[in-house]
Image (cartoon, rainbow, N blue to C red):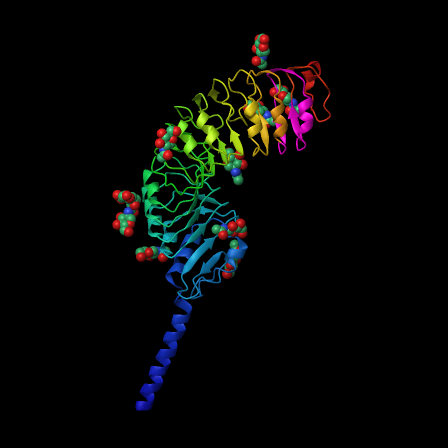
Amino acid sequence: MKMRLLVVALCLLFLFLHLYSVSALNSDGLALLSFMSHWTFVPPRINSTWIPSHSTPCSWEGVQCDTATRRVVSLNLSYYHIPGQLRPEIANCTQLKDLDLSYNYFTGQIPHSFNNLHKLTLLDLSINLLTGSIPTSIGNMTQLRYLYLQNNTLSGTIPSTIGNCTQLQELFLNFNQFQGVIPHTLNTNLLRFDVAGNKLTGTIPFGSSSGCQNLLFLDISFNFFSGGIPSAIGNCTSLSQFAAVRCNLVGTIPSSIGLLTKLSILHLPENHLSGKIPPEIELQLGGNLFGGRIPRSVGALQNLIYGLNLSSNGLMGDIPVEIGKLKTLQMLDLSQNNLTGSIQVLDELPSLVQINISYNSFQVVRHPMVWFAPKAAAI
Ligand SMILES: *[C@@H]1O[C@H](CO)[C@@H](O)[C@H](O)[C@H]1NC(C)=O
Ligand SMILES: *[C@@H]1O[C@H](CO)[C@@H](O)[C@H](O)[C@H]1NC(C)=O
Ligand SMILES: *[C@@H]1O[C@H](CO)[C@@H](O)[C@H](O)[C@H]1NC(C)=O
Ligand SMILES: *[C@@H]1O[C@H](CO)[C@@H](O)[C@H](O)[C@H]1NC(C)=O
Ligand SMILES: *[C@@H]1O[C@H](CO)[C@@H](O)[C@H](O)[C@H]1NC(C)=O
Ligand SMILES: *[C@@H]1O[C@H](CO)[C@@H](O)[C@H](O)[C@H]1NC(C)=O
Ligand SMILES: *[C@@H]1O[C@H](CO)[C@@H](O)[C@H](O)[C@H]1NC(C)=O
Ligand SMILES: *[C@@H]1O[C@H](CO)[C@@H](O)[C@H](O)[C@H]1NC(C)=O
Ligand SMILES: *[C@@H]1O[C@H](CO)[C@@H](O)[C@H](O)[C@H]1NC(C)=O
Ligand SMILES: *[C@@H]1O[C@H](CO)[C@@H](O)[C@H](O)[C@H]1NC(C)=O
């Protein structure tokens, strides 16, 4: 009798273990399968490895787990071109640190449930078809360092709660439909900020209300700002690349730009900037309304590697000999001004591969590297 009971008990135990081993996919795995069930195409490498009978998703394509807890810490489905919906269940993987879903065709909104992802340091949803706005709950992702949302169709305002993401270093919101102002709450640890190609308005906050001591890269091009370039931009002393192409800038370029000694690219074409070019600067200023001469201090811009574009600025007079100090300069566009004198100094620029001096009034001393535009033979 006792023997029979023991056998029955053992059988039940084996049955239980067997059931357990086939059905015990953990909650992270269930969340991933649920996410996958909303894709209209499942790439073969994912279909063949995301196996429901596993107990964890740790060996699945694109998934990495913590070795001790077997919880998912990284999901990278970048470049799979997956058509599907971005679903709130991913937020059930509450231990996620990196979530990279870039280069897919995900539709829908950024789920509010993402505020559960307290450990997330990287969120890359760039190059997808997402709509809607950034949830204000983004401020709950206090570990977030890298947020890439570029090239979607996101709209609404940039929530000021993003200032609660105090670890944020890179914020890429370019090529969306964001409107309203750049929040003044952006954290001061930010290294790279890109909002090019949106519908933003208001003033440029950097340097005054929004700290920027660490900012290396700033691109605010193709927006509708008012108020011009603030002189406080001179506080952003780490700035190496600053682009503000066609974004409705008016007024003069503040001389505080000269404080930005690390600047290697300044790109300001297609605005309504006027007045003299401050002696401290130049670079990509083509198509503005400057006049006068090329400042001799242009020779101080020795960090300038790529280009100097002074095209269409109504400049007069000679090319200053100091330009010969820009030994690393590769591109020089002086076209469409009223410059006169000799172009001999250009022989001293050993790195120059691209130059345009057409539509000026130079006394031509033929320069071997000069490209001559059709009318340039008459310069
Ligand atoms: C996600 O978690 C919620 C709450 O814990 C639960 O109700 C839901 O069933 C889970 N969904 C999936 C797909 O795991
Ligand atoms: C996905 O894998 C299952 C087997 O796990 C297979 O039956 C099915 O045809 C696969 N689907 C695609 C789209 O490859
Ligand atoms: C995801 O994978 C792609 C290509 O496989 C890689 O370039 C990218 O750096 C990965 N993302 C993360 C966050 O590691
Ligand atoms: C942020 O998280 C806290 C708890 O950590 C929660 O009480 C609060 O509702 C969350 N806020 C948002 C906006 O999600
Ligand atoms: C952001 O921080 C402020 C306090 O600094 C707090 O009142 C607010 O609820 C936080 N918002 C979120 C979304 O975490
Ligand atoms: C992002 O959008 C811009 C503007 O439409 C486009 O020029 C760029 O090629 C896009 N980037 C990618 C990787 O698709
Ligand atoms: C930034 O610059 C402005 C003017 O250039 C100055 O008045 C202000 O004190 C500076 N702010 C900080 C935080 O350094
Ligand atoms: C210089 O700027 C003008 C005006 O924006 C632009 O048309 C031209 O293509 C630029 N030159 C080069 C070489 O990029
Ligand atoms: C050059 O100067 C002449 C008058 O001296 C002026 O009519 C013309 O508009 C100027 N050209 C440019 C490109 O500024
Ligand atoms: C030089 O500049 C002129 C006027 O800006 C432009 O029409 C021409 O195409 C440029 N030449 C080359 C080779 O880019």
Find residue 171 and report its image quarter.
top left
Nearer the observer, 322 or 153? 322
Residue 54 in percent (x, y) is at 45, 65
Nearer the observer, 146 or 176? 146
Q: In which quadrant will I find the C terminus?
A: top right
Residue ID at (57%, 23%): 296
The magenta-colored residue range is 327-356
In this picture, is 37 found above or below 288? below
* Number of numbered tags placed on the structure image: 0
Q: Is residue 328 magenta?
A: yes
Residue 83 in percent (x, y) is at 48, 46
In this picture, is 171 found above or below 204? below
**Quick check: 372 left or right of 305?**
right
Q: Is residue 3 magenta?
A: no
Q: Is residue 1 visible?
A: no
Residue 238 in percent (x, y) is at 46, 38
Nearer the observer, 354 or 108? 354
Residue 68 in percent (x, y) is at 41, 66
Q: Is residue 83 visible?
A: yes
Find residue 360 and report its image quarter.
top right
Nearer the observer, 183 or 343? 343
Find residue 370 and report its image quarter.
top right
Q: In which quadrant will I find the N terminus?
A: bottom left
